[in-house]
Image (tube, rainbow, N blue to C red):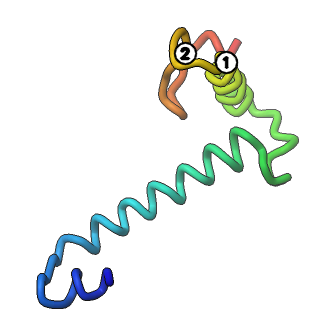
Amino acid sequence: SGFVVLWGEFNFWFGLPIAIGIFLYGLTYFAVHDIFIHQRFKIFKKTNNWYAKGIRRAHKIHHKNIGKEKGECFGMLWVPIKYFK
């Protein structure tokens, strides 16, 4: 299993930092995308922050087009200023 690869015969010492980085990215993505943007839990439901509203508005536009073409693409936390107005 993974422990044999990390600390066994192969001794890939660099595997642990890579695995931790992937785990932290996934955890952060879940927290930002599912909890903050899509509001799957009731933690940030009534946030009245201008930044939160802009990010959610931009993400809604991102999901507006179902197909691969003609969709709007931008960073998850870095969106054009027009969505904050």
Q: Is residue 51 left or right of residue 5?
A: right
The one nearer the camera, 59 or 9, is 9
Q: Position of residue 57 (x, y in %)?
A: 71, 22
Q: Against 6, is 42 above or below?
A: above
Q: Amino acid at mark 2?
A: Glu
Whether the residues at callouts 2 and 1 have beta carbons within 8 Å, the answer is: yes
First-in-chain label (2 vs 1): 1
Kindly identify which residue carries mark 1: 61
In what element is the residue under mark 1?
helix
Q: Amino acid at mark 1?
A: Ile
Residue at 37%, 68% in the rendered image? 20
- The quadrant in which the N terminus is found is bottom left
The quarter of the displayed image where residue 22 is located: bottom left
Q: Which mark is residue 72?
A: 2
Residue at 28%, 74% in the rendered image? 16
Residue at 82%, 34% in the rendered image? 48
Residue at 75%, 33% in the rendered image? 49
In what element is the residue under mark 2?
loop
